[in-house]
Image (cartoon, rainbow, N blue to C red):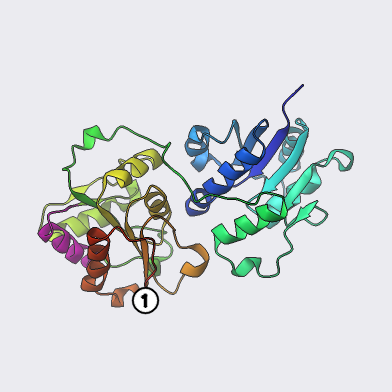
Amino acid sequence: MAAPEILIIRHGALGDMIQSLGPFEAIRRHHADARITLLTTAPFAALAEACPWIDEVWLDPRPGWRQPAAWLALRRRLSSRRFERVYDLQTSGRSSLYFHLFPRRHRPQWSGIAVGGSHFHANPHRDHMHTLDRQRDQLRLAGIDTVPAPDLSWFDADIAAFALPADFALLVPGGSAHRPGKRWPASAYAALCGRLDAHGLTPVLLGGPDEAGLAAEIAAQAGVPVRDLSGRTDFAAIATLARAARVAVGNDTGPMHIVAAAGCPSVVLFSDESEPRLCAPRGRAVRVLQQPRLADLAADQVWAEAEKLLASDAMPTQARA
């Protein structure tokens, strides 16, 4: 007898994908004998293919509204499997529309917010819930009562080539280029580098290739030895570095979700451009600091929170500046 077919829809962004790892694991446990397919987008293919709870990864072409041939191709692909149930963790207008791409007589059970779906997430407060809480509530209504925290223990890379010292701290100073208000200033990160160095920790800068200039600016201002890994780390390397780091400090950006989920004690910095109650990383030891303008957040205040994490094995807490 063929295994039941289950589809999960999750496109991203990175932080959303990391926060869906717990639901992935819960869905796998609930459908232990099923074949589970994830419909996602290209940036997350490597992460999804390595994920132990996913059997197959499909890349969503996300067709435009004036691409009828692409929509038909997507419909054919979705209909090529007799999915027993779809878990729409994206719950967007686009992903809800996919419910209607299935032939009416063969529509699978549907967990999400698609009108007509069998397991409609009707909680009127869903848009005001943290991503993790919202997903747990959605899955509870679909019969899955236990959803673990995101786990990245399976995600590994060889970081030996970086030749890092035993004691180092991760700094994630970048973020969305079109939202500069979500970035703590380079000068503040440079000042923090001095605090870390005085504590015997080597600052290690993470970022994409387009953030190399920012990393160079921080290193030039720091006045202490700094290791710059911008443009040299994929998601798996970030997770592996996080497990080895003593502490991490970074902006509200995707890599900090990896760092926190990997178990690294983390201080995450928020401005008023995003709401930590809805989307902040959660992990073994995560502190959230928020100021309306991150330029007003002092390096000493951030260092004080990092120092507490270094000195304690406390359970996760949140602090608000």
Left or right: where 21 falls relative to 313 = right
Point out the image quarter for the C terminus.
Answer: bottom left
Residue placed furthest toward the top: 1
Image check: 54 left or right of 233? right
Query: Image point 58% across, 50% down: which residue?
Result: 147
| Residue drawn 73% across the image and 35% down it | 73
Residue 196 vertical position relative to residue 210 in the rendered view, above or below: below
Residue beneath the point at 43% across and 42% down? 152
Asked whether the viewer can see residue 13, the reply is no
Number of callouts: 1
Residue 51 within the magenta-colored segment of the rendering: no
Label 1 element class: loop
The one nearer the camera, 143 or 246, is 143
Snapshot quadrant of residue 163: top left
Reply yes or no: does residue 187 show up in magenta. Answer: yes
Residue 140, image x, y percentages:
67, 54
116 on left or right of 302: right
- Quarter of the figure with the N terminus: top right
The residue depicted at 35 percent of the width and 44 percent of the height is 238
Front-most of 62 and 281?
281
Report the amino acid beneath label 1: Gln
| 162 sits left or right of 38 in the view | left
- Rendered position, 20 above or below 191: above
**Residue where numbered disc 1 is placed:** 291
Magenta residues, as a range? 186-202
Q: Position of residue 266 (x, y in %)?
A: 33, 58
> Can residue 149 be seen?
yes
**Residue 320 drawn at (x, y percent):** 38, 75
Q: Is residue 63 above or below residue 91?
A: above
Does the magenta stretch mainly form a helix, a strand or a loop? helix
Residue furthest right in the image: 105
Can you give x and y, in whole percent of width and height, for residue 180 in the image? 38, 66
